[in-house]
Image (cartoon, grey):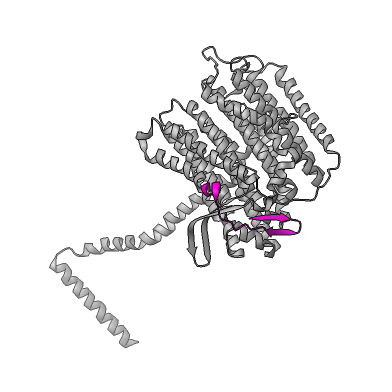
Amino acid sequence: MFALHEGGAIPVVDPTSADGVFSLLWLVIALPLAGAAVLLIGGKYTDKWGHLLGTLLPIGSFVISLLMFISVTGRDDTDRQISQHLYDWIQVGHLDVGMDLLYDPLSALFLLLITGVGSLIHVYSIGYMAHDPRRRRFFGYLNLFVAAMLVLVLSENYLGLFLGWEGVGLASYLLIGFWQHKPTAAAAAKKAFVINRVGDMGLSLAIMLFFITFGSTSFTVISAHAGEATDTTLTILGLLLLLGACGKSAQFPLQAWLLDAMEGPTPVSALIHAATMVTAGVYLIVRSNFIFELAPHAQTVVVIVAVISIFWGAWIGCAKDDIKKGLAGSTMSQIGYMMLAAGLGVAGYAFAIMHLLMHGFFKANMFLGAGSVMHGMDDDVDMRHYGALRKMMPVTFLTFAMGYLAIIGFPGFSGFWSKDKIIETALADNWVVGLCALAGAGVTGFYMTRMMLMTFFTEKRWEKDVHPHESPSVMTGPLVVLAALSIFGGVVLINDWIVDFLSPVTGTAPHEDPPIPAIAISLIAVLVVAAGVAIAWMIFGRREVPREAPQDVSFVTRAGREEVYGNRINDTLVVNPGRHVVAASLAVDHYAVDGTLTGGPVAIGAVATVARRAQNGFVRSYALSLLGGALVVVLVLLAVNVV
């Protein structure tokens, strides 16, 4: 629909309607949406086969997405945008919004990630949720999650994107709190829902401002006229979009919900962190590149938020003993790398998406691997209770190890190529930002090695009545596929394929050499990561790991365990003041509003209570009253005449 070039946004419109395999574009969304409807409305009658239907439909969407991807790669760059009009959605005054779908290189890659990794998570869930009495409902929610994310990335306008955006928020609420009998799960779901609504306010205000400024919410229209808006308007739009992205992608300062979300079943964690929810914010920034390219101040804020998030998440990952929460902190940090690349502009958009894809592979692998470990350890999530599991769970260990090597950037693995490119681009743009990205890679090597050592190496620390065992093949099968993708995912960088493929959406930028040769940057990055690995080995590999977390620890460790006091900061700045405001409002409502409305009748009732005592039914009393009244009248008349 549009492309970015030096000097501004130049729309490249392809009016061709969807034909051939692209005519099935709507079906990519319809299949999981139909699955959600059948499983959630069908009730107990679908219990026996609901999980199978819920798995087959996303696989069907993946097959269609793969066929479309193969077809679009055979087209010229200028012919890789296909639109499909489904129906007129909103027609009110000057607001004319269609339910239109846009298939282009950016949405093509997201479709493969969402449906491909999402399908593997569905297959894994067949085994993981085998004994849950509400398994059919769980698969219905998974299908709803996938369908909402597909709406988000396929919509041709911001209003359709917002529909999918809110659908993702609803599905995440349902899945995080799926085990609602646990108070912690119910609280976590509510927390995620409320914090995301803060970000959603930013996106909704941005959509309103789009309509006021451009008279449309269409990507095509806005990209064509973005240069006509004032710098102030563009900056405000960029900041509002960033606020929305921070909520969905758990970036500073809206990150507090992410670790609590681990209360949901482990497949939910994999789906949220790898294939769907947290990637939505990165998608929003890259899709809105025509705004950010004209709003450099907003781009700078994106970079600042990203750098803070990289270290904030890494800090948490270094201190958490809960294996899922450690991975959640890692997600915040890795999404920070994607946001950093997106904030660097045209030079970084493709690498942001590349790292997003690679992260989808290795992080889904590790989250599902963590679920496999929990499955064999009676649902214990404390890594201090693990140790030496590589012999007890060989498939889980080997596949998890592939994800570990990918995320730390071991040469040749998928994360090595994507993270190196982000560091290289950051150094070419700003050496301070580049050094921060480089340092973050070293910290990643530390906390991920800590996780590997505490889980699969060192001495065993589990109780005698715990019997670690390998997971069934329905769970390990997806791990093997994801492990292979974690190894070979970097092939998308051969001959800069992903850069060229995304250029119709993200544009192209003149090549800028980093301050030192790229090969030197790669070598330095490997050495920095190796240093982090070595430090972790010295602390956790060569020393005995206590089964209970030491309490006499440094401030750094204590702060990491407390999630860098994110919850306390929120309580101090938002929650507690909010409670005081609500309490004051209730007091005003009770004493002022209710008092005003009810005070008059109460006063009249009190007067009536006193007055009715005079109505005692005795004639002599009434005669006395008449005499007294007449006397008062006479006295008044005499007083008037005298005056």
Please tell me which residue is depicted at 55% across the width and 16% down the height of the picture.
468
Please tell me which residue is depicted at 72% across the width and 38% down the height of the picture.
493
Q: Nearer the viewer, residue 526 or 491?
A: 491
Q: Report the number of numbered marks.
A: 0
Q: Residue furthest left?
A: 619
Q: Residue furthest right?
A: 516
State the quadrant of the C terminus: bottom left
Q: Is residue 107 left or right of residue 131?
A: right
The spot of residue 536 in percent (x, y) is 73, 24
Up/down of 1 relative to 259, above or below: below
Instruction: Report if residue 19 lies within the magenta region.
Output: yes
Magenta residue span: 1-24
Q: Nearer the viewer, residue 131 or 22?
A: 22
Instruction: Report if residue 469 lies within the magenta region.
Output: no
Q: Nearer the viewer, residue 576 or 67?
A: 67
Up/down of 369 relative to 197, above or below: above
The spot of residue 134 in percent (x, y) is 41, 32
The answer to whether one can see residue 140 in this image is yes
State the quadrant of the N terminus: bottom right
Up/down of 114 relative to 291, above or below: above
The spot of residue 512 in percent (x, y) is 82, 47
Q: Is residue 404 left or right of residue 171?
A: right
The spot of residue 572 in percent (x, y) is 60, 44
The answer to whether one can see residue 169 in this image is no
- The quarter of the picture where residue 204 lies is bottom right
Q: Is residue 186 left or right of residue 43?
A: right
